[in-house]
Amino acid sequence: MSTSHHSDLQILKEIAELLNQGTDVNNVLSEVLKKLLHVTGLQTGWIFLIDDAGSFSLAAKENLPPALSDNQYAPMCSGDCWCINRYNKGRIDKATNIIECMRLEDAIEHKLGDTWGLTHHATVPLKAGKEKFGLLNVGAPNKTSFNNEELALLESVALQIGSALKRINLTQKEQEIALTAERNRLARDLHDSVNQLLFSLSLTARGGKEMTTDQDVKETFSYIQDLAQEALNEMRALIWQLRPKGLEQGIVSALSSYGEMLGLNTNIKINGVINLPSRIEEAVFRISQEALANCKKHSQQSDVHLFVHGSDSRITIEIKDNGCGFTYDEGLVLPSLGLKSMRNRAESLGGTFYLESELNKGTKLRVSIPF
């Protein structure tokens, strides 16, 4: 590792500038890793983010040899390794020298590909105060040790990364809180103004209908009353979507309440334990809302079957009706904006979207999202 062209302070300054610019975790980590390897003369590096449960993800990687990068980095995305095991047991508190890599040893043993002479790496925990975020690993071909000066630099960089991760997490939480507050404000405004106007219009139409004896006028007032009531129902549904009462009791309770509000008989079956991160819960809830609304509008059936399967790493939700259905070809563009929105929500979180429908044979929608 050579720092002849860069002082340690210059390296830290350049990395700090990169970290301060970013708000997307994966992009930030990728750019910082690239910069660190460039200025230190090291060749290979990767960053594992590790949650409180000990599960890890490959958040950034740079110039990994074929033995570790084949099959879309499969050797790096599963299985055990000594550095993660030690980290989870609280045995890595600072930059650690000469960690022989279990993943590389497995690759050599099973002849998974060229390792470019990489056998060892330094590993450094990413921390901010008492919070831990994961591990930074760096190495170079035929390099089996790092001196104290090199480890000290890596530790300083890791501390900067940990502080940036904490800042980004706090910013995201603040944005979520602000978004929730804005939703609540909009829901209140709609309820206090538009909702009241529609209710007044419905009452006025009913009064007008009772005051006249002209049959045509009666029918006109009746039509206005029906339109006002329909708009009122739509507005209540919109308010409910903006401020989903019941979601605090869990997604199943929320969907049951929403189906009931739409006038559907929602038969819900649950398999497994469902404890979702808030962003996944929100996405599943919105997708299911759209699906239930479609059942109400298009299926000409009031019975809907909803199946929820939860595991410790994935949620799958299936919504099925026995209504009129429609002709759907999986190879063609989705026929409505609502369906496209559901698919986009699922795929943006790494999930899958499956739709099956046939005329007079109902519709089945299945969404599966990992977390």
Image: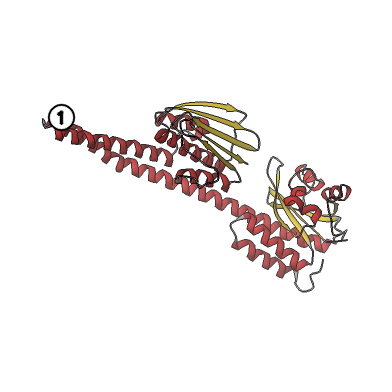
Compared to 279, does 44 lie above or below? Answer: below
Quarter of the image with the N terminus in it: bottom right
Task: Tell which of 10 and 192 is nearer to you.
Answer: 192
Compared to 38, does 235 lie above or below? Answer: above
Task: Tell which of 46 and 91 is nearer to you.
Answer: 46
Query: How has the structure been colored for display?
Result: secondary structure
Q: Position of residue 186 (x, y in %)?
A: 38, 46
Q: Position of residue 299 (x, y in %)?
A: 43, 32
Q: How many marks?
A: 1
Q: Residue 312's quadrant in the figure?
A: top right
Q: Residue at x 68, y 42 (%)?
A: 52
| Amino acid, disc 1 | Glu
Q: Is residue 88 left or right of residue 116?
A: left
Quarter of the image with the C terminus in it: top right
Q: Position of residue 122 (x, y in %)?
A: 81, 56
Compared to 250, does 341 lie above or below? Answer: below
Residue farthest left in this picture: 213
Q: Residue at x 71, y 53 (%)?
A: 126
Query: Which residue matches tag 1?
Result: 210
SS of the residue at dot 1?
helix
Compared to 11, does 102 lie above or below? Answer: above
Q: Is residue 108 left or right of residue 197?
A: right
Q: Position of residue 124 (x, y in %)?
A: 76, 54
Q: Label 1: how many residues lie within 10 Å, few (<14), some (14-19) or many (20+)? A: few
Q: Is residue 249 left or right of residue 150?
A: left
Q: Is residue 250 visible?
A: no
Q: Is residue 19 visible?
A: yes
Q: Residue 79's quadrant in the figure?
A: top right
